Image (tube, rainbow, N blue to C red):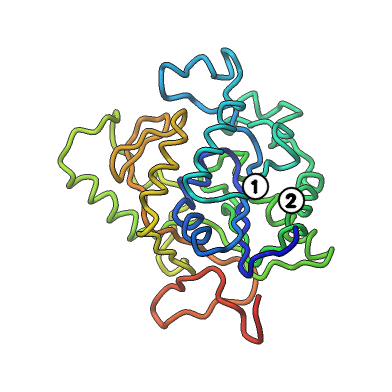
Amino acid sequence: MTDLPARRLLLVHAHPDDETINNGVTMAKYAAEGALVTLVTCTLGEEGEVIPPELAHLAADRDNTLGDYRIGELADAMTELGVKDHRFLGGAGRYRDSGMMGVEQNDDPGCFWQADLDEAAGHLAEVILDVRPQALVTYDDNGGYGHPDHIQAHRVALRGYELAADQGHRIARVYEICTPRSVLEAGFRRLAEAGKDFPFGGVATVDDVPGVVDDDQVTVAIDGTRYEDRKTAAMRAHASQIAVDGPFFALSNDLGQPYFASEYYRQVRGEALPAPEGRWADDLFEPPAGGAA
């Protein structure tokens, strides 16, 4: 890719919708500021549980066309976030959604969980060498909540980082998605205080949310307040998977939970970010000492 913007962010996600839930305001903010935001999605999400009854026929055990449908949902969500560079790992449909941990779909030789790590990471390394990002975002080593595709996305992201470094581009900083416990607890208090009837079957708990960490493990907090409406619109674009009600949402488990206009990251590779004492850094791109990333 020629004429690259000065700042370049790469995000690696397992399924369509993961990027918006976890990083929607971050993506919208940096895209609006002129950074190149590149999203790599590893599967089409073919095994997702469909929420709207009118779309139930798309499911894997019926028409098995959910993956194709979610390509369109993802494109609409990226339009809402202003993200123009989106790619599927190895091409659309190269790796199939593996389903939740422990189901028979995990054994499908074509699923992402069964993918050869170096082959899949090689596809990612090609993207890294093309866009030369300074920052990479993905899940923690448990994939946030133990989903095999999320765990594999973490492995592929870190292996792709290594392979690209061997071939001439070392990403300056690698981040894992996280949520500080204090922020999440405050969000659930807001949900409880809302005093309204939700269209959801119940309310989630802190233990239902992936990637929760103690506050002192957080490195960066991205304030995306100006872009919250874009995140909301992008979440609504993923209508087969997400039900949105104000600042709250539910997945197929029908349990309401808050989502946030700020998003949080823990740095796991690269030179440590400078941050004000007692505070989190506020930029994924702060250059390391001695020159730009």
The answer to whether residue 208 is left or right of residue 76 is: left
- Which residue is labeled 1 in the image? 40
Quadrant of the rendered image containing residue 201? top left
Q: Residue at x 60, y 66 (%)?
A: 268
Category of crowding for the residue at label 2, using alpha-carbon neighbours closer than 10 angstroms: few (below 14), some (14–19), many (at least 20): many
The answer to whether the residues at label 2 and label 1 have Cβ atoms under 8 Å apart is yes
* SS state under label 2: helix
In this view, the residue farthest toward the front is 3
- Disc 1 marks which amino acid? Val
What is the quadrant of the C terminus in the image?
bottom right
Q: Which labelled disc corresponds to residue 124?
A: 2
Of residues 240 and 265, the one drawn nearer to the viewer in this rendering:
240
What is the quadrant of the N terminus in the image?
bottom right
Percent from the top left, x then y, of residue 192? 21, 45
Quadrant of the rendered image containing residue 198? top left
Quadrant of the rendered image containing residue 243? top left
